Image: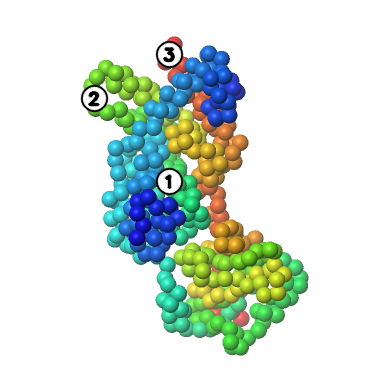
Amino acid sequence: MSPIDPRLQEALDGERDPGDLPADLREAHARLIAATQMLKATPPVSVAWRVMAEIRENPGRVQSDGPARRLIRWLGRPRAFTVRLRPVWTLALAAGLVTVLLLPWSNGGPTPGVAQGIASFVGHFPGARSVEVVGSFNDWSRGTLHLNDDNGDGIWHAKAVLPAGQHEYMFVVDGERWVPDPLAGRYVDDGFGAGQQNSLLIVRPVSSQP
Amino acid sequence: MVNDGAPDMEVVAQVLGGDGEAFGILIRRYEPGLLRFATRMLGNPDAAADAVAESLVRAYRHLAQCRDPGRLRSWLYRITGNRCRSHLARRHTNDISLSDAPPLADGSDTWAVLERSEQVALVERALAALPAEKREAFVLKHVEGMSYEEMATVTGARIPTLKMRVHRAREALLAALEEVVR
């Protein structure tokens, strides 16, 4: 196998008019194009019925619950107290977080059940118009967990009561940019190839807190 | 209710809104290409059909994770490509066997068709002899007609890497074709 003339590669990449190639390269170009045409036949089979049958058997998993149903489910869970500490960008932010985390939840904050914990999400997104969290805990649905930046310093934060255990999540910035949490510390492949990673969050149950 | 011509984003929204039947629109839209891609990757129509079916079910289950429904095609190819790679890994080889090569010509017995069938078999053998990553790059570029940018989205590889793979695949295919001409 010998290297192909770069001009032929350029023509095959659409960067050069094949008509400008020397005769021998034009012939090779035509041969390769003809070969690729032969590979374009579509197999005369269909898997549509298999896929739709599988979907009909279990149609609900892709659907995300509506806000009312999520609220009812949330209200129906027992409440307890726990805090999840995360790395911080600056010492000042760390101090602020510690202050917030040390506040007793009985002062009006959400109270997790025995098998639940409170997750704190913090992200530094200066100039962002909105930041929200999607993850395995909300079926990757947008519009359910928004972060706030009340003082406009670019540091967005939110808390949520989540079932204890491991959750995957991402930030969605300005409604369109999906980014992993740079402070997560742990990441996991999203399972769709291409090396994309979800952030990993481990929520400790209240019973494990000192 | 969305119709068959609705943009991907509308159909995805419909499915996520609870209309699972709308996913059939996406299947009809992308199944032919996905089957063609998987068949070229795996060399076996049955294995390809399984890979595509599994990929589509997986896509349905995780549709809410599709970060850009406007680029649904890339996302579906990425899932299918991943499935094909898993399948090849289970076989302990990236090469597909010649006996697996799918018949693509129709059943007519005219000489012209038979001759074309031989040519198709030759090209398929040359493709099958390529390492999986070069085969994937070549198929995405020349069979599925993707840009290098879209290929990068599908495979996760960098564009210069993909260009190199496509170039090497072309060289191998051309060498195989010229071998027969001699």
- Distance from Cα at disc 3 to Cα at disc 1: 35 Å
- Distance from Cα at disc 2 to Cα at disc 3: 25 Å
Q: Chain of mark 2?
A: B
Residue A154, position in %: x, y?
A: 70, 67
Badge 3: residue crowd in 10 Å (few <14, some 14–19, many ≥20): few
Look at discs 2 and 3 and give the one toward the viewer. 2
The amino acid marked with disc number 2 is: Ser
Check the image and report above or below for B112 versus B142: above
Q: Secondary structure at mark 3?
A: helix
**Quadrant where the C terminus of chain B is found in the figure:** top left
Look at mark 1 in the image and give the residue it sits on.
B80
- Which label number is shown at residue B33? none
- Distance from Cα at disc 1 to Cα at disc 2: 32 Å
Q: Quadrant of residue B144?
A: top left
Badge 2: residue crowd in 10 Å (few <14, some 14–19, many ≥20): few
Please say if the residues under marks 1 and 2 sit with CB atoms less than 8 Å apart: no
The amino acid marked with disc number 1 is: Thr
Q: Secondary structure at mark 2?
A: loop
Look at mark 2 in the image and give the residue it sits on.
B108
Please say if the residues under marks 3 and 1 sit with CB atoms less than 8 Å apart: no
The amino acid marked with disc number 3 is: Val
Q: Do callouts 1 and 2 point to residues on the same chain?
A: yes
Number of numbered labels in the structure image: 3
Q: Tell me which label, 2 or 3, sits earlier in the chain.
A: 2
Q: Tell me which label, 3 or 1, sits earlier in the chain.
A: 1
Q: Tell me which label, 1 or 2, sits earlier in the chain.
A: 1
Look at mark 3 in the image and give the residue it sits on.
B181
